[in-house]
Amino acid sequence: FVWCVYLQLNYPVLILAIFICSIGGTFQYGFNISVMTSPSQFIKELVNKSCVERFDRILMDWEVSLIWSFTVSVFCIGGLLGSLIASSISSRFGRKRCLLLNNFWAILGAILMILSRTANSFEMIMVGRFLYGINAGIGLSAQAMYLTESAPKNLRAMVGVTIATALAIGKFCGQLLGIRELLGTEKSWPWLLGFNGFTALFQLCTLPLLPESPRFLLLERGDLQASEKAFRKLWGKKDHSKEVVEMLEEKAALQSIRSCSVLELFQNRTVRWQLLSIVIVFTSLQLCGINAVYFYSFDVFRAAGIQEHRLAYAALGTGLCELTTSIACSMIIESMGKKDLMFRGYIGMAASLGLLSVTVYFQKTVWWLPYCSMVLVFVFIFFFSSGPAATTIPLPGEILTQSFKSAGYTVGCTVNWTCLFVLGSLFPILVEHLGNFCFLIFLAVCLVCGFHVRFNMPETKDRTALEISAEFDRMHAKDKTSQKKNSSKICEIKAQETKCTAE
């Protein structure tokens, strides 16, 4: 509470920027992940009704399931497309204008959703989900770039956590608005699916009040005066000279280097460990088992004696757990550091999955094991929210220099959406053949990523991108010659900083 009061008193415009960017950014992503659960039966009825009226044919169950699965998964296809075009749009038009233009995808999708039942068209829901996916894919990258580039270095980690917090709020709102007492009814479900349009409209009206990213203005537009004006508007009267010096230092180091494409990022050997880290952590974010735990949580709650009509309210508990943990994490991340949080999160998740495999397997034979399983579900969500969820999305903006940032976010978000789509397609098959032992696959992913973070990634706390790049080189230097070169690189960085300060 004291930390929140401190931020509101010292950085009120930055807090406003976090809220405005989040409501039209990762909030949309989280909302669309959870919102389809509640109206699923109504949408399936619409599919059958449409086919009867058009073709005079009642669909078989497997045909309805196939259409339903595609309706859900087309969101990932849109997200993949959005992440692929986010880099070029944000580099060409700027972070702020990219976020502004992105809202039109969500508004158009919302119109289709709201009119789908009146038009008796399930195809409108498919197209709406696709447009929502494009909106989420662009917003995920653009919001992360804007906020991490606008935050002071000492608050960068905390601001990064707010990206995950907005996603958790979106998930929780999707669950909450979907209950029968609110919009989860046969009459109101189109408005539930169209809710994203209202949040997009809110961002469209309020985002023009904020300045462009200061780092973008200086490092990519070369406009020092506009950058300083943006700093003053975001930070008030706080001294931002040190941040400007560090950006000028980075600009001097990258003076002859333009913004790089994804292909150039893959071809550049100097950032191969940063690129490998981005691929591993974004892959693990989807393959860590969080979706499997949410899937099995209903079976766990049933086994614990929760009645069928109350399962939706129990699911609210999981969403609330993720939300409160994410908020709490934002208070401690500056003191603990991202590397420790990510490592402990993955190891804690691996231990929870191992125990959950055992308790779910034997829960029908031992009466108290379902309660242990229920506790382990919440423990797993706690470690996920305080580790990978809180630290992964802003990572490319912290470990890559300005010329590689857009390409880095494109790679990370593309991997994220691809893994989400593959998991959605293969997970039912895994459950059918492996049952709860599918947890062991996700356990292995958590261990691999956890140990990669522990031994192959440096801490990013209170470090510039150039310092983090030098630390990557030091950690992976193969011989003493490389280490000497790396030491001279660090000295050169500090010399440049001293020179910029003097100027």
Image (cartoon, helix red, strand yellow):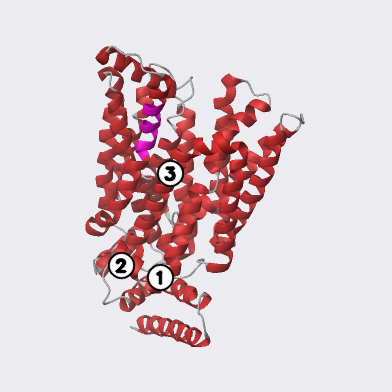
Residue placed at 49% from the left, 24% from the top?
Answer: 179
In depth, the one of 177 and 20 nearer the eye is 177
Q: Earlier in the sequence, mark 1 or mark 3?
A: 1
Q: Position of residue 485 (x, y in %)?
A: 45, 86
Residue 210, visible in the rendered structure: yes
The residue beneath circle 1 is 271
Amino acid of disc 1: Val
| Relative height, residue 19 to residue 157 (above, below) | above
In depth, the one of 57 and 171 nearer the eye is 57
Amino acid of disc 2: Glu
Q: Is residue 396 magenta?
A: no
How far apart are labels 3 and 2 at the CA level?
26 Å
Residue 5, visible in the rendered structure: no
For residue 264, which numbered disc appears in the image? 2
> Is there a contact, CB below 8 Å, between mark 1 and mark 2?
no
Q: Range of the magenta residues? A: 66-75
| Secondary element at tag 3 | helix
Point out the residue furthest to the front here.
433
Query: Taking 198 as reference, is 176 left or right?
Result: right
How far apart are labels 1 and 2 at the CA level?
10 Å
In depth, the one of 235 and 473 nearer the eye is 473
The residue beneath circle 3 is 422
Residue 503 falls in image quadrant: bottom left
How far apart are labels 1 and 3 at the CA level?
27 Å
